[in-house]
Image (cartoon, rainbow, N blue to C red):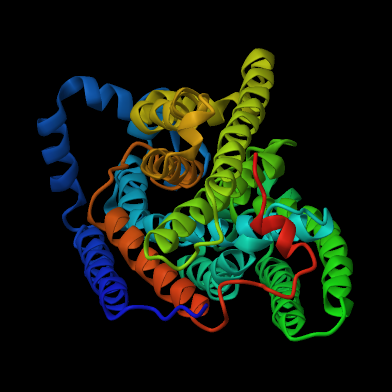
Amino acid sequence: MEYKISNRLRMGAIIMMVLGLIGVVYGFMDSHSVTEANISEVLAAEHHGHGDAHATESHGNEHADSGHGEVVAHGEEHNSDKAHGGLTHHEEHALHQIHNRPYAALYVGAFFFFMIALGVLAFYAIQYAAQAGWSPVLFRVMEGITSYVLPGGLIVLAIAFAADSHLFVWLKEGVTEVGHENYDKLVAGKSGWLNKTGFFIRGLIFLGGWSLYRYFSRKFSIAQDSADDNKNFKKNFRISAAFLVFYIYTESMMAWDWIMSVDPHWFSTLFGWYVFASMFVSGITVIAMITIYLKSKGLLEFVNDSHIHDLAKFMFGISIFWTYLWFSQFMLIWYSNIPEEVTYFVTRIEHYKLPFFGMLAMNFIFPLLLLMNSDYKRINWFVIMTGIVILCGHYLDVFNWIMPATVVDRWFIGMPEIGAILLFGGLFLFIVFTALGKAPLLAKGNPFMKESEHFHY
């Protein structure tokens, strides 16, 4: 059965991209309209609008330079000489944070949709390596979603390259040079790993390995449709098993480079797994939502309620796994109360109460309550509703990774953030549904296909 992207869907994706691009451009123009000449007026207006309570919160005992954790004492901030360009240190920090916001919003949106595709790629490889009998009817949906891995990853790297020190403090000029005003001893100690050349070489290696697996796996999958034996399936099995070893290492390193290094003063040994759980459940959720959409169009008649039920079980189970990792990370850091570690959560609890605690509710409480009942996992509209909550929750998860380290308390979900979601969401839909139309939606040559078609739970 063939699928061709409809004109309505194509136009919808294009309109999303255009509207998103307008929002992103507006965000950059708005942030750069704040300059050294008028930053004092902007801060005065903020102070007047938010009152003394907000001013006290924003100018607490510690202030992060551009949101990257360089501590400046409150007394020093106001009693020190003027910073560059006649600005006080507070004004300079505020200007950096305002200018950082559109870069951070763009990066959050780009990484969110990229991690969905990468999560699906891992799930797809697991199905092949495990020789799962229930899932082959979903393989072409997974292959369509994973078509976004390469373009999505290149976009993330391109934004990182363009944003430079707006996102990564270790790219700031002089940060590793002793005696320079920007010198940071801790960051300098990590310069053997955190340097621009190494960052982009590793990024290209990660993307190259993931994309090569996707290319050959897709090639063998399509070739198996017209093959007389299972040779292509066996090749897919072998490369999937090898890929999973490569993936588990590179995904963790990617999490260190692309996410954790935004705040290089903080680290967590669980962070790679934590990012994996977020991308994994987001990817499975999108598989379920696209499958239900295609089925509603009469294109996946071989997918039954048991397949949807199993996808919903994964959505439920991995949400619990994500919560386990989140709490393990939080509990150990909060209980030990080591200043270099606990500041990560202090910043988010003080300045990000709504997205921080809202993310917890959407990623744990809602999936737990909505998908605990087995019967609800078979109701398509219920799975879609739960999926929307899960995806919104994990967008906020990515938001909480990036924004506190770049804009501190100057966050807001406005034009730049919504524009980035529309821009990359439209591109994601366009690429994925175009890929879905390039091969039959049933991988009929898979030796487990009959078992999958008659799967019942």
Residue 160 located left or right of residue 388? right
The quadrant holding residue 53 is: top left
**Percent from the top left, x then y, of residue 48?**
10, 32
User: What percent of the width, then of the height, locates residue 91?
Assistant: 29, 45
Would residue 181 be seen by someone viewing this image from the given angle?
no
Instruction: Farthest residue to the top: give it.
Output: 335
> Which of 219/177 is in front?
219
**Is residue 108 found left or right of 422 in the rendered image?**
right
Near-viewer residue (229 or 67): 229
The answer to which image quadrant residue 195 occupies is bottom right
User: At x 69% / y 15%, what residue is drawn?
Assistant: 336
381 sits to left or right of 155:
left
Query: In the displayed structure, would residue 52 be above or below residue 274?
Result: above
Q: Nearer the viewer, residue 387 or 82?
A: 387
**Above or below: residue 52 compared with residue 411:** above
From what the image shows, is residue 426 above or below residue 125? Answer: below
Toward the viewer: 133 or 389? 133
- The answer to whether any part of residue 87 appears in the image is yes
Where residue 409 appears, x then y in whole percent? 34, 36
Quarter of the picture holding the C terminus: top right
Please report the residue visible at 77 percent of the width from the left and 53 percent of the height from the top: 132
Residue 163: percent from left, percent from top: 46, 66
Task: Choose top left, top right, bottom left or bottom right for residue 416.
Answer: bottom left
Marks counted in the figure total 0
Residue 355 falls left or right of residue 221: left
